[in-house]
Amino acid sequence: MNLNQVTIPALDVEKATEFYKTLGLRLIVDALPRYVRFECPDGDATFSIHKVDKLQKGYGTTIYFEENNLDAWVTQLQNKGITFNELPKDQSYLWREARLQDPDGNQIILYYAGKNRKNPPWRIN
C-alpha cells in the first residue's frame, strides 16, 4: 500500500494555493476556484485542496512535510513572508520540528526525522 494524496478543505482555494506554492509544492491540477492538486518536490505523494463553504470546528488537519535541511528551509520561507508559530526545535521523540498554520488554520509541521521517521529506537518488531 502507498499513500497517494492528502486533501484538505479551504474557504479560499486561490489563497491556499499561493501559500502552498510558497512552501515549494508544484501545482499539477488547476481547477480553481474549487480544487487544486500539487506534487511534492520529493517522492510520489500528492496534496490537494478543495473548496468548502464552512470549515469544521475542532482540532482540524495536521500536515507534515519533511526536509533534510529544515533550518535553512525555514529561513528561506521566513524571507518569503511565511510566519511561524514555532521555529525549529528538537523534540523528545527525536524529530526536529517547526510549526505554522495555513490560511485556513490547518496546522503544518515542517520537520526532519531521518531514520527516526519510521524506525525510532522504540519501534516494535
Image: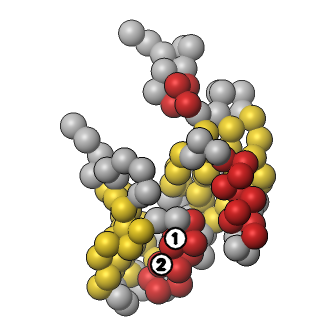
Position of 28 with respect to 72 (left or right) is left
The answer to which of 52 and 118 lies nearer the viewer is 118
**Which of the 4 quarters of the picture holds residue 37?**
bottom left
Q: Which residue is mark 2?
A: 17
How many neighbours does mark 2 have within 10 angstroms: few (below 14), some (14-19), or many (20 or more)?
A: many
Position of 101 with respect to 55 (left or right) is right
Q: Residue at x 29, y 46 (%)?
A: 3
The answer to which of 122 and 75 lies nearer the viewer is 75
Q: Is residue 30 above or below residue 124?
A: below
In this rendering, does residue 11 appear at all?
A: no
The coloring applied to the image is: secondary structure
**Which of the 4 quarters of the picture holds residue 23?**
bottom right
Return the x and y of residue 101 as percentages of the image width and height: 64, 65
Q: Are marks 1 and 2 in contact (CB under 8 Å)?
A: yes
Q: Amino acid at mark 1?
A: Tyr
Q: Residue at x 41, y 68 (%)?
A: 26
Furthest-top residue in this view? 125
Mark pair 1, 2: CA separation: 5 Å
Label 1 element class: helix
Label 2 element class: helix
Q: Which residue is mark 1?
A: 20
Position of 89 with respect to 114 (left or right) is right
Q: Residue at x 52, y 60 (%)?
A: 60
Q: Is residue 67 above or below residue 100?
A: above
Return the x and y of residue 94 as percentages of the image width and height: 66, 27
Q: Amino acid at mark 2?
A: Thr
Q: Is residue 79 above or below residue 98?
A: below
Q: Residue at x 73, y 75 (%)?
A: 81
How many neighbours does mark 1 have within 10 angstroms: few (below 14), some (14-19), or many (20 or more)?
A: some
